[in-house]
Image (cartoon, grey):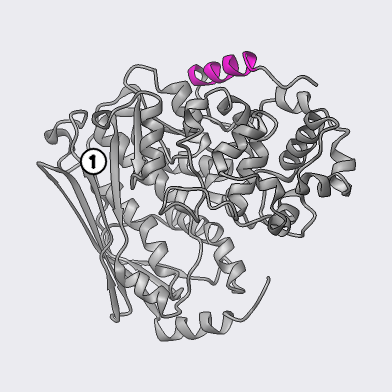
Amino acid sequence: MPTSSRHKDFLDLRKKFPFFCFEKQEYKLTGDGLHAGFTFNLSDRYFFHPTLFIPRKDFFLPDEHLSGNLDEIVFHIGLIELISYWKATCSPLVVIKPFYLKEEQISWWKKLWFNGLGEFFYLNGIATIPEEFMTVEIRSGTRPFHSPLPTRDEILIPVGGGKDSAVTLQLLGNLPGSLPLILNPRGASIETIRAVGFSNDRLLEIRRTLDPVLLQLNGEGFLNGHTPFSALLAFVTLLAAMITGKRFIALSNESSANEPTIPGTTINHQYSKSVGFEGDFRDYVKRYLFVNHEYFSFLRPLNELQIAAIFAKFPAYFPVFKSCNAGSKTDSWCGACPKCLFTCLILAPFISPQERFSIFGKELFDNTDLMPVFDQLTGLANEKPFDCVGTVEEVNLALCETIRQYGNDPLPRLLAYYRDTGPYRHYREFSFSRFMDTMSDNHFVPGRFLEILKTEMKNLTLPAC
């Protein structure tokens, strides 16, 4: 672990705040949409009230189908929401009041909780193990019940505003009944759906609100860090599929998300984007929620280079897509973070230097201040960046191919530096085209959608080697 400076805070906070309680949930259908809310109690000292709102659209199922049939999924959204609030103190006891959970369900949640907070524990220097980090106590004997809701073989497509969801939307958005979904809409996500031809009346919006008390605690120095956001997205999109009657939920997570951030460990910034979590979630839904919806990642058979090659075919997205966390509030690329540099280098083999410059507003490969991040991405450093970036192999293959395309022209400074490193000498012997031709079999993509992906890959034109 990088530091143990906060482990004492972890122990002190657990003593000061011995329990965290999920007190209640509620939801209601009104003329303007679906409102859901939760009440969390931190040792009778602080109370949190996060909310979720889905504006009503014409594609909602009738209220008579939905009323009384959403308790269970709303409860599960509360269970995933509470992780963000629990982490402030890591209270040793978690009390669940609204509904009953079986022992095997509790085990499932503890696995998600522990692995999804792997980065949080690591960066805060917290030493704990799955058997000790918290205990769950169920205070209710009531099991939620719902009648089966009608579904159609149509697809819900979550869109975040980055290149991956743009590719999924481009390839699946023209199927009958396809519907984009955006959680907390921002400029890039809205402009992405518009670029493919969707208007606001063909968009499912979800508005999630954090309780400001949590932000207050963060400012006061309580524990803070990364949580499994994609696991939250999984349960929220399942709710969205239920209220719209869409059977399929197509995420845009790729095979690269399976690689640990810290080599030789299970610590993965992208744990809840991994195929391991995806399989666990699908199994949980089947075993305990009994709904006729299928959650999968459409891009799981592909690596980041293959996705970048497909994305590069659709320049309409170049001015609008954004996936920089630092620039998310201003809907821009900051040009100084791991996500910006990774996106630049993974696209570099497939777009021109001029197109790179137009996207990022500068030549990132000339910015030597990015050298530490560059070393992390290429594997020269001991750790990958804690961000949603590709594998070390993908990064190195992208850089080697980009250098090859420069030929005898002068290289930008980071590429010139890279050409003198061991990774370059190692990876330049690899077959770029063979890497681009191989699709992973480790996925859950239904056959009809897999054929769309295979057809797209067959029609892909690669750089001349």
Task: Please identify the quarter of the rendering in which residue 410 is found.
Answer: top right
Mark yes or no: residue 148 visible.
Answer: no
**Image quadrant where one finds the N terminus:** bottom right
**In screen coordinates, is 285 left or right of 275?**
left
Q: Identify the residue under disc 1.
A: 146
The foreground one among 102 and 321 is 321
Q: Is residue 357 above or below residue 384?
A: above
Question: Of the residues shown, which amino acid type is indicated by label 1?
Answer: His
Q: Magenta stretch?
A: 448-460
**Image quadrant where one finds the C terminus:** top right
Q: Is residue 285 above or below residue 271?
A: above
Percent of width and height locating residue 340: 59, 48
Magenta segment's dominant SS is helix
The foreground one among 389 and 30 is 389
Percent of width and height locating residue 211: 29, 65
Q: Residues within 10 Å of mark 1 (few under 14, many from 20)?
A: some
State the residue at coordinates (61%, 81%): 5
Q: Is residue 132 above or below residue 229?
A: below
Q: Is residue 241 magenta?
A: no
